[in-house]
Image (tube, helix red, strand yellow):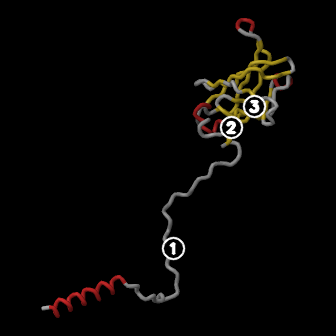
């Protein structure tokens, strides 16, 4: 009986050793490379690296701020330009409008749900003025109106229009 048990343990041990041991490496039957599987992945669409016209953003200024880092006011025209309105103005944060060289920075900018960006203390040749830029979803041209005074004494100083571009 002991011989039978010893033989069974020996056969079982040899079977386990064979199963756990390393299989000898064999060379592939041929040297051809395996066929490449065709990719079914959808191609990656890259966003434009440069500025995107605001009309192409397809969102209002508040929603677009979640996807875009800054907004550039370019190609300005109007009476404000003659008074020194900055040509390198950017809307850089929910509460900041500034020139790119930071010669003018205002961190009390307000944006409302209608798309109006309001900022105060813009230095023009006539003095500091308050300005409002009115954006519209699907439209790239922004109308800017600058005023001085407060309350009933508020007077329009100048107007301008710009092309608004967004950047990631």
Judge from the rendering whether residue 3 lies leftward or rightward of residue 24; answer left or right.
Answer: left
| Up-down relation of residue 168 to residue 5 (above or below) | above
Q: Residue at x 84, y 17 (%)?
A: 127
Mark 2 lies on residue: 70
Mark 3–mark 2 distance (CA, rounded to whole Å)? 11 Å
Left or right of 101? Residue 49 is: left
Residue at 78% of width from left, 33% of height from top?
A: 99
The image position of residue 68, as x and y in percent, is 64, 40
Please tell me whether residue 95 is drawn above or below residue 32 in the rendered image. above
Q: Nearer the viewer, mark 2 or mark 1?
A: 2
Q: Which residue is mark 3?
A: 98
Q: Earlier in the sequence, mark 3 or mark 2?
A: 2
- Mark 2 or 1 closer to N-term? 1
Could you tell me which secondary element the residue under label 2 belongs to?
strand
How packed mark 2 is, by other alpha carbons closer than 10 Å (few <14, some 14-19, many 20 or more), is: some
Q: Mark 1 highlights which residue?
A: 36
Furthest residue in direction left, as rendered? 1
Q: Is residue 147 left or right of residue 64?
A: right
Query: Disc 2 and disc 1: Cα gap in Å?
Result: 43 Å
């Amino acid at each position: 009986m002991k011989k039978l048990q010893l033989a069974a343990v020996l056969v079982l041990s040899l079977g386990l050793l064979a199963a756990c041991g390393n299989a000898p490496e064999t060379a592939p039957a041929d040297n051809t490379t395996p066929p490449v599987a065709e990719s079914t992945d959808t191609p990656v669409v890259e966003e434009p690296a440069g500025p995107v016209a605001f009309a192409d953003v397809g969102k209002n200024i508040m929603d677009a701020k979640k996807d875009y880092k800054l907004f550039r006011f370019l190609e300005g025209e109007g009476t404000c330009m003659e008074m020194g309105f900055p040509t390198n103005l950017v809307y850089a944060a929910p509460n900041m409008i500034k020139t790119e060289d930071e010669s003018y920075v205002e961190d009390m900018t307000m944006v409302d749900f209608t798309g109006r960006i309001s900022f105060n203390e813009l230095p023009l040749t006539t003095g500091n003025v308050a300005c409002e830029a009115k954006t519209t979803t699907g439209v790239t041209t922004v109308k800017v109106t600058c005023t001085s005074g407060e309350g009933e004494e508020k007077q329009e100083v100048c107007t301008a229009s710009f092309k608004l571009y967004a950047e990631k």
